[in-house]
């Protein structure tokens, strides 16, 4: 018999079982009223959202999720529903998927491979399943797996050996640059090896620092991608099988890396602001490249009417910075303020004059300027209920080229995992869509403008040198010797590593930011603040 399957890329709100349940019911009802469908598949842990973290220790939370499963069983008894939830059995909790049909539970699968690396810590919460799951539905034998399982060839083969003609996999696979290609290549190879078509359904949406890209896909038994859904978009897609063979359908082109990175940042900002109930976003617009990109991202995420830009010039701010900030704000149609900080800087300088008597001017005075800006921006954020977006990038966060309680002040850091060179690439990409960032912002040397004629290169190696060193040290865990052996200057490597290691205390106090690399600061990379280790 033909088998029509609906793949639901959905954005769950972590912790709100009732809201997620209602969205599932609404989706099922809409599909039922408009399409002829046999089976509807939702992503991993759809009822709770992913990752629910220590909410999984709450018995009332788990009880609500398990009770919701029984309520779903009777929503559309003539349609099979596959949904992920945390299953409590005795005193053990499993990351499970259930198939509901004709008002009852047809089968339940418990995730066997529990990821415990990078951003994942499922062994903290779940017990591992031990058995494959294959059920008969409309004359076809269908296997179930969950996310990490399908990355392992032995699980795919074991499901095939158990009799599966088709494999369904429920996923909450977070995005990083190049992740879609990585998924398709590996899972396609497993499908080919087992000669088993795989239907891969992924979650979509932002959750704190994680962003889920959707990008669901289907492989045929030869491992070829024969269907691909949109990325970063909630979507319902339909594929059809007959006698275990996929009927040809349309396939989205594979995603371009810079485009995907940009969409991930937009989605992350939108969901963080909306899910946490902020009325919009506000940011300091300096006339530099970082804040220019953040403004473009914020407007694309929230709409110009929900974004405010604030210029906070000091006596060291160049006229072209003020001009470019005002120009971009006008182009993008956001509310714009210009609030000079010199009165506040002078007030603090006067207050501290006796205390600082006999000392020379240094970064202390520079940081007072940044902290005055932070106070103003946070005050506006508090007053208006808008989220303050910080504008620092990954290169700066890596080496501590930022001021605690100054330019680091804020609630969310969109560029926290975006190296400086990628900032420029993303800005150019955005301008290709429509020119919103003034050209001079893209071409002038970057500067914090906290001292006369200041440039980033006064304090840091050139970003063309610094960013590759940081990528090797932070994302690949290479030692200084390994980086130097790759052709980098010993002085530049030693200096960069010293700055990274000495800035951990700052990063721990920085705002949450969107993860787009394979190794971001936060849940990915967890180093001690107080440490005597000095790598070589």
Image (cartoon, rainbow, N blue to C red):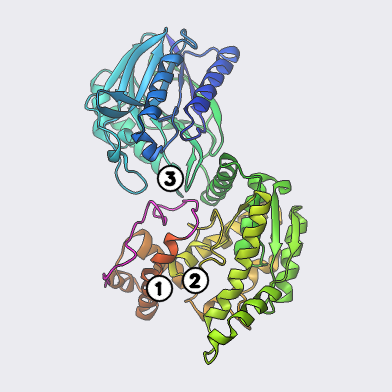
Q: Which residue is mark 2?
A: 401
* Frontmost residue, 439 versus 114: 114
Magenta stretch bounds: 510-536
For residue 182, side relative to residue 117 (left or right): right
> Residue 162: percent from the left, percent from the top?
24, 19
> Residue 190: percent from the left, percent from the top?
31, 34
SS for callout 3: helix
SS for callout 1: helix
For residue 482, side relative to residue 475 (left or right): left
The first of marks 2 and 1 along the sequence is 2
The residue positioned 45% from the left and 48% from the top of the image is: 176
- Whether residue 527 is in magenta: the answer is yes
Label 3: few (<14), some (14–19) or many (≥20) C-alpha neighbours in 10 Å: some
Q: Which residue is mark 1?
A: 499
For residue 223, side relative to residue 257 (left or right): left
> Residue 376: percent from the left, percent from the top?
65, 63
Mark-to-mark CA distance, 3 and 2: 29 Å
For residue 141, side relative to residue 380 (left or right): left
Above or below: residue 187 compared with residue 307: above
Q: Which residue is mark 3?
A: 179
* Frontmost residue, 20 versus 352: 352
Mark-to-mark CA distance, 2 and 1: 9 Å
Quarter where residue 181 is shown: top left
The residue positioned 45% from the left and 67% from the top of the image is: 467
């Amino acid at each position: 018999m033909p088998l029509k399957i609906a793949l639901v890329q959905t954005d769950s709100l972590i912790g709100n079982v009732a809201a997620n349940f209602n969205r599932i019911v609404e989706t099922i009802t809409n599909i039922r009223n408009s399409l002829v469908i046999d089976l509807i598949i939702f992503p991993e842990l759809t009822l709770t959202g992913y990752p629910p973290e220590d909410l999984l220790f709450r018995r009332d939370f788990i009880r609500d999720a398990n009770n919701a499963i029984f309520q779903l069983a009777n929503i559309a008894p003539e349609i099979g529903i596959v949904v992920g939830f945390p299953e409590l059995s005795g005193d053990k909790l499993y990351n499970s998927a259930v198939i509901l049909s004709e008002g009852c539970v047809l089968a339940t699968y418990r995730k066997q491979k529990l990821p415990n690396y990078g951003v994942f810590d499922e062994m903290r919460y779940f017990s591992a399943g031990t058995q494959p799951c294959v059920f008969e539905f409309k004359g076809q034998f269908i296997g179930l797996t969950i996310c990490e399982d399908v990355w392992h060839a032995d699980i795919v083969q074991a499901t095939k050996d158990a009799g599966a003609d088709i494999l369904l996999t429920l996923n909450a696979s977070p995005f990083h640059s190049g992740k879609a290609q990585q998924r398709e290549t590996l899972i396609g190879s497993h499908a080919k090896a087992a000669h088993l078509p795989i239907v891969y359904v992924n979650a979509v949406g932002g959750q704190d620092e994680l962003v889920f890209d959707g990008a669901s896909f289907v492989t045929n038994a030869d491992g070829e991608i024969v269907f691909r859904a949109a990325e970063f978009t909630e979507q319902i897609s339909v594929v059809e099988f007959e006698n275990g063979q996929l009927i040809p359908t349309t396939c989205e082109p594979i995603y371009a890396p810079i485009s995907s990175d940009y969409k991930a940042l937009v989605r992350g900002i939108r969901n963080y602001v909306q899910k946490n109930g902020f009325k919009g976003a506000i940011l300091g617009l300096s006339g530099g490249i970082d804040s220019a990109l953040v403004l473009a991202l914020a407007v694309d995420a929230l709409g110009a009417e929900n974004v405010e830009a604030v210029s906070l010039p000091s006596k060291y701010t160049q006229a072209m910075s003020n001009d470019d900030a005002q120009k971009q704000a006008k182009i993008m149609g956001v509310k714009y303020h210009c609030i000079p900080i010199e009165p506040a800087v002078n007030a603090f300088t006067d207050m501290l004059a006796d205390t600082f008597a006999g000392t020379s001017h240094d970064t202390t005075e520079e940081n007072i300027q940044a902290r005055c800006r932070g106070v103003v921006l946070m005050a506006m954020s508090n007053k208006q209920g808008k989220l303050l977006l910080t504008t620092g990038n990954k290169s700066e966060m890596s080496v501590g080229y930022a001021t605690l309680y100054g330019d680091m002040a804020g609630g969310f850091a969109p560029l926290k995992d975006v190296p400086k060179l990628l900032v420029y690439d993303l800005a150019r990409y955005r301008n290709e869509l429509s020119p919103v960032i003034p050209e001079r912002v893209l071409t002038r040397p970057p500067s914090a403008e906290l001292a006369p004629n200041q440039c980033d290169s006064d304090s840091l190696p050139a970003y063309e040198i610094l960013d590759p060193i940081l990528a090797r040290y932070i994302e690949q865990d290479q030692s200084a010797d390994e980086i130097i052996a790759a052709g980098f200057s010993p002085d530049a490597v030693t200096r960069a590593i010293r700055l990274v290691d000495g800035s951990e205390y700052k990063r721990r106090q920085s705002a949450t930011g969107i993860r787009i690399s394979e190794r971001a600061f936060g849940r990915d990379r967890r180093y001690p603040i107080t440490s005597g280790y000095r790598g070589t």
